[in-house]
Amino acid sequence: MSEKVCDHHETVRRNRARRWAAALLTFVFVVALVVLIVWAILQPKKPRFTLQDATIFNLNISAANVISATVQVTVSSRNPNARIGVYYDRLSAYATYRSQQISYSTAIPNVYRARTSTCGPPAGAGLHGPLAARRAADGAVNLLVKMNGRVRWKVGSFISGRYHLHVACAAYIPVGNSKNTGIVVGNSVKYQLSQRCSVNV
């Protein structure tokens, strides 16, 4: 008799475990389905960044192939999402030349970009840094402006967790060559670049 009772309890436990497993799988499936539907409706896209211009201050050519200057760049950001807002947190920017950092890292205040909006530089100001590098043969300087930080997505009242943001903007500055298209502004020269940046989230 006791064996039958034990068998009965074992069967009950197995059935209960199966029901829990089925409920868990159903829950996971429903959550995945909801996420898929939301993603299909919202169609989230990465933010876009554009290197708008670069301004050269205090240009000094000390040798035939060496220059020194202070460079200020302006980067604009665009949120291409029609239903999603973007928070930028802990952004910082710096310039590199030939894989070496040549400017201090500049902190950028946190900012929010509403749906489908284009605004000026996330920093509200350009990135400043001294440049001391060899010029290319055609009299141009190739800099790489990098930005690192975090992004959060906002859908209605829901705000996601933070995701890493990496932006790289190639700045080809035609200093002192025949293609020099700079505009003299006081004691500086401003170059309109309008170059798209690569973005990884």
Image (cartoon, rainbow, N blue to C red):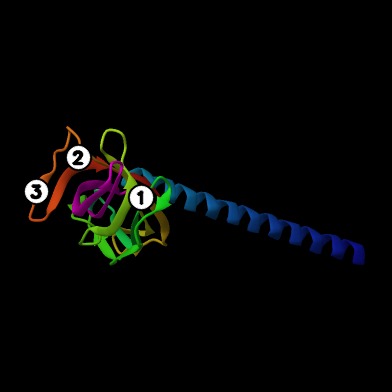
Residue 122 sits in quarter: bottom left
The crowd level at tag 1 (other Cα within 10 Å; few <14, some 14-19, many 20+) is many
Residue 111 sits in quarter: bottom left
Q: From where the camera sits, is residue 169 visible?
A: no
Q: Is residue 47 highlighted in magenta?
A: yes
Q: What residue is drawn where x is 29% and y is 57%?
A: 130
Three-letter amino acid code of the residue under disc 3:
Val
Q: Is residue 116 left or right of residue 41?
A: left
Q: Is residue 3 left or right of residue 83?
A: right
Numbered disc 2: secondary structure = loop
Near-viewer residue (173 or 61) = 61
N-term-proximal mark, 1 vs 3 = 1
Three-letter amino acid code of the residue under disc 2:
Gly
Query: Where's the N terminus, which quadrant?
Result: bottom right
Q: Are marks 2 and 3 in contact (CB under 8 Å)?
A: no
Marks 1/3: CA distance? 29 Å
N-term-proximal mark, 2 vs 3 = 2
Question: In the picture shown, does residue 9 fall above or below 38?
Answer: below
Which marked residue is nearer to the observer: mark 2 or mark 3? 2
Residue assigned mark 2: 176
Marks 2/3: CA distance? 13 Å
Numbered disc 1: secondary structure = strand
Identify the magenta region. Answer: 46-72
Residue assigned mark 3: 184
Which marked residue is nearer to the observer: mark 1 or mark 3? 3
Q: What residue is drawn where x is 91% and y is 63%?
A: 3
Q: What residue is drawn where x is 25% and y is 46%?
A: 50
